[in-house]
Each structure stands twice: as C-alpha cells, then as structure tokens.
Image (cartoon, coloured by chain):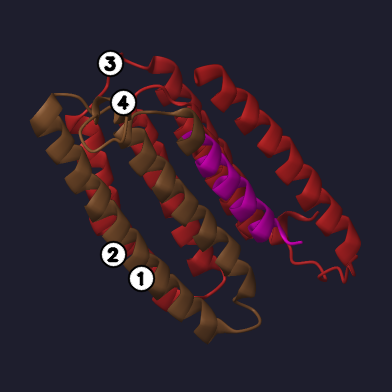
C-alpha cells in the first residue's frame, strides 16, 4: 500500500466520520468534498500504471463533486430561506413521524 | 540522505494534515480553507508525478469552482465565530516547515531508488484494523448524539 492510497483512505474515513457526527448541512458539504479529495489522493497511486485511467477518473470525480456540491448548496440555501437554520434537524416537513 | 524522494511524501502528508484540520476546525470558514489547502496539495502532488491534465482539472475546475462554492457557503452560513490565532500559527508553521523540507529535498544529491517488495497481506490487515477502529469510533459518536 503506497502512501497515496493510505492518505486517500484516511481522508475518506475522516470525511465519513465527520458526516456521521455532524448535523450541520455546511459541515456535511465540507465533509463530502473531503471524501472527494481523498479519492483524488488514492487515485494518484494508479498514475504510474495507467495515466489515461487517472485522467478519466479525475474527470469523472470532478463532475460528480460539482453536481453533489451544487445539490447540497441548493439544499442549504433553500433550508436557510425556509427555516432560518442550516441544521438537518430543522427539516421537519416530509418526515413520516 | 533520502530527501530526494521526499517531495511527494511531503505533499501527501500536507494533504493529510489539512484533511485532519478540516474535520477538527470548529469554524466553517477555517474548515473550508483547510479543505481548499488539502485539495491544492493533492493538485501539487499530481504535478509532482507529472500528471498535468488531471492537475489542470483539479486546480481550475475543482478548486476554482467547487472550492469557491464551498468557501462562500461556509462564509455565509456559519462563518468565522472567533479569531483563530492558533489556526493561523499552526498552518503557517506547517507551511514553512514543508517549504524548507521541499527546498532541501530539491537540492539534495540524488540517490538510487530503493526496490522494496512489500507484502499484500500486511496492507490488508492494516486496512481492516483501520476500518474496525473507525467503525467503533463512529458508532460511539453517533450513539452519543442520538
């Protein structure tokens, strides 16, 4: 296991941990991006074997992260406009109970 | 002297440092700034391993668009609650230390690369232990909050 893969795995686990322990939507957005950064770091280990795979992998990861960031940002803005908070627990409409 | 093979390791460890700082900064702005620094370190690592097209994507699209969105969102909702002198001091010291190490590594005489054949079993065991430890910590933290 190279250092790049190790750093990538640690960053992904840190991001998952941060998502699990927070209820703030902004922190969720930041943690999701941290997971993406970890994936970038882990993908760098493949560069010596297959550079084309790395290029397309980075391209797809960037596209995914752009879309997820825009969706979460829209959720944050809308939630703040409706409730005045950015906390997940403020979203009560739409819940079953 | 192993400094000539250390630039990549310095960049990756800087990424790790800023990633940890992202999770453990209390203010959203400092957290987002650390995240941008981690992404920049990964981009620099891509340049170091001569992958210029992925580095271009990382710097222009990822940092230029996504990080801008994240930092703006963090600044609008949450922001900086306190003047974190310790954060600035710690990041400045790490930056200076990494820069000095990088300069030393750049000017160090080249040595022959070591051929190390690492076993696969050890990495699998380490990964499993890491996943078990993180699952335990996440389980305890989630249980404390619900």
Chain given the colour red: B
For the residues marked 1 and 2, what is the alpha-carbon distance in whole angstroms?
6 Å
Chain given the colour brown: A
Tell me where the magenta segment starts and ends, as one range: A1-18
Mark 1 sits on what residue?
B56
Quadrant assignment, res B72: top left
Chain at tag 4: A
Percent of width and height locating residue B95: 49, 38
Residue contact at pointers 1 and 2, CB within 8 angstroms: yes
B107 in relation to A78, above or below:
below
Q: Are marks 3 and 4 on the same chain?
A: no
Mark 2 sits on what residue?
B60
Mark 3 sits on what residue?
B81
For the residues marked 2 and 4, what is the alpha-carbon distance in whole angstroms?
35 Å
Mark 4 sits on what residue?
A89
Q: Secondary structure at mark 1?
A: helix
For the residues marked 3 and 4, what is the alpha-carbon distance in whole angstroms?
21 Å
Quadrant assignment, res B110: bottom right
Q: Are marks 4 and 1 on the same chain?
A: no
- Crowd tier of the residue under label 2, counting other residues whose Cα lies within 10 Å: few below 14, some 14–19, many 20 or above: few
């Amino acid at each position: 296991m190279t250092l790049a893969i190790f750093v990538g795995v640690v960053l992904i686990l840190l991001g998952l941990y941060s998502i699990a322990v927070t209820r703030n939507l902004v922190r969720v957005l930041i943690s999701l991006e941290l997971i993406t950064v970890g994936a970038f770091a882990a993908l760098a280990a493949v560069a010596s074997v297959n550079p084309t795979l790395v290029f397309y992998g980075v391209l797809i990861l960037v596209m995914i992260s752009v879309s997820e960031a825009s969706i979460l940002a829209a959720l944050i803005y809308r939630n703040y406009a409706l409730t005045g908070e950015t906390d997940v627990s403020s979203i009560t409409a739409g819940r079953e109970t | 002297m192993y400094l000539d093979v250390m630039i990549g390791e310095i960049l990756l460890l800087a990424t790790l440092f800023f990633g940890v700082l992202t999770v453990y900064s209390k203010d959203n702005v400092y957290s987002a700034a650390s995240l941008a620094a981690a992404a920049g370190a990964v981009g620099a690592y891509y340049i170091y391993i001569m992958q210029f097209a992925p580095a271009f994507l990382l710097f222009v699209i990822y940092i230029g668009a996504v990080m801008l969105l994240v930092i703006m969102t963090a600044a609008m909702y949450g922001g900086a609650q306190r003047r974190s002198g310790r954060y600035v001091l710690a990041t400045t010291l790490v930056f200076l230390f990494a820069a000095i190490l990088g300069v030393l590594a750049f000017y160090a005489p080249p040595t022959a690369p070591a051929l190390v054949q690492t076993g696969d079993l050890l990495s699998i065991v380490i990964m499993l232990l890491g996943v078990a430890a993180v699952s335990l910590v996440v389980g305890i933290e989630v249980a404390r909050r619900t």
